[in-house]
Image (tube, rainbow, N blue to C red):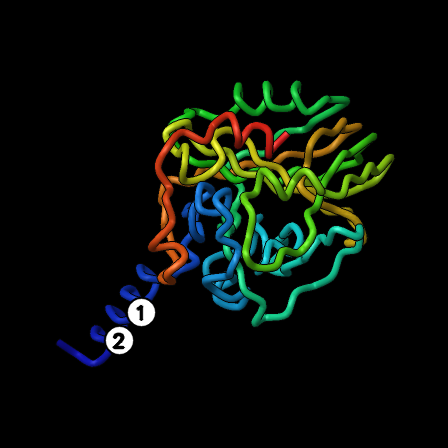
Amino acid sequence: MSKYMMFCLFIVFLSCISPAQQHRLTQVSTINALMTGIYDGSCTVQELKTYGDFGIGTFNNLDGEMALLDGICYKMQSDGSVVQTTAHEKVPFASVTKFSSDTTIALNALSQKALVTILDSTIPTKNIFFAIRIDGLFKIVNVRSVPKQSPPYVPLIQVVQKQSLFTFENFEGTLIAFRCPDYAKGINVPGYHFHFISKDKQKGGHVLDFTLEHGTANIEKLNEFLMLLPSDKAFYDASLSGDKEKELNKIEK
């Protein structure tokens, strides 16, 4: 085999193993682990960004909500401020992908419930994962963020009782969302999980409700799934069994 052919095969091999492969959802830890109170980060923002440029999650000690947009990672804090994160900040839970739209639809005057109905009628199946990016003008967005925690950690259901709530009116911005199938229960949030960040990158959080004035939705099918599990004692010893669906619904909404 010539050196040229060997070089070409090597390039193909590298492209096949690239961690930021398109149409792949990469996830750090599990939602049940986060709900249990495992808030110590298992990878850095720098490492996370090798797997994607679009995503949501949280940070070490549950310190705020994550918006990874166009390759820049933002922390939406419990005091309402938004800051860019450092490369070495750690992440205990996140979902990311290298975003590449498959489908684009125009949207006008929709509540969150109505938008979900449209998205469900647009996607070809509910049995794979989807990434959704919605850019537009929002009439109203209700979001939350949570305060930084200190050991010994309490379960997430107790943390959100002290969450910070914010309402934004008439703001341009972006919804960063994933839709997970029902069988992902315990692994991720079944259905839709939305985070919002304003166009000026000054406001945002985990979305509780919204009304969209007008905008555009870009949707990507994610038919590969990669999970990065923690290797620390807290995760190894955690009790992650049991149905936490009702508890998760309270946390999300």
Residue depicted at x 61% and y 40%: 158
Seen as rendered, the residue at the extreme left is 1
Task: Using a 10 Å C-alpha cutoff, classify the residue at mark 1 as few (fewer than 14 neighbours), some (14 to 19) or many (20 or more).
Answer: few
Element class at badge 2 = helix
- Discs 1, 2 touching: Cβ within 8 Å: yes
* In this picture, residue 117 sits left or right of residue 13: right
Task: Point out residue 37 in the picture as x, y percentages from the top left corner.
Answer: 51, 49
The label number, if any, that marks residue 130 in the structure image: none
* In this picture, residue 68 sits left or right of residue 166: left
Name the residue carrying label 1. 11
- The three-letter amino acid code for the residue at tag 2 is Phe
* In this picture, residue 236 sits left or right of residue 65: left
Image vertical order of residue 159 relative to residue 237, above or below: above
The label number, if any, that marks residue 7 in the structure image: 2
Name the one closer to the observer, 238 or 116: 238
Image vertical order of residue 116 relative to residue 208, above or below: above
- The three-letter amino acid code for the residue at tag 1 is Ile
Disc 1 and disc 2: Cα gap in Å?
A: 6 Å
Residue depicted at x 53% and y 32%: 248
Element class at badge 1 = helix
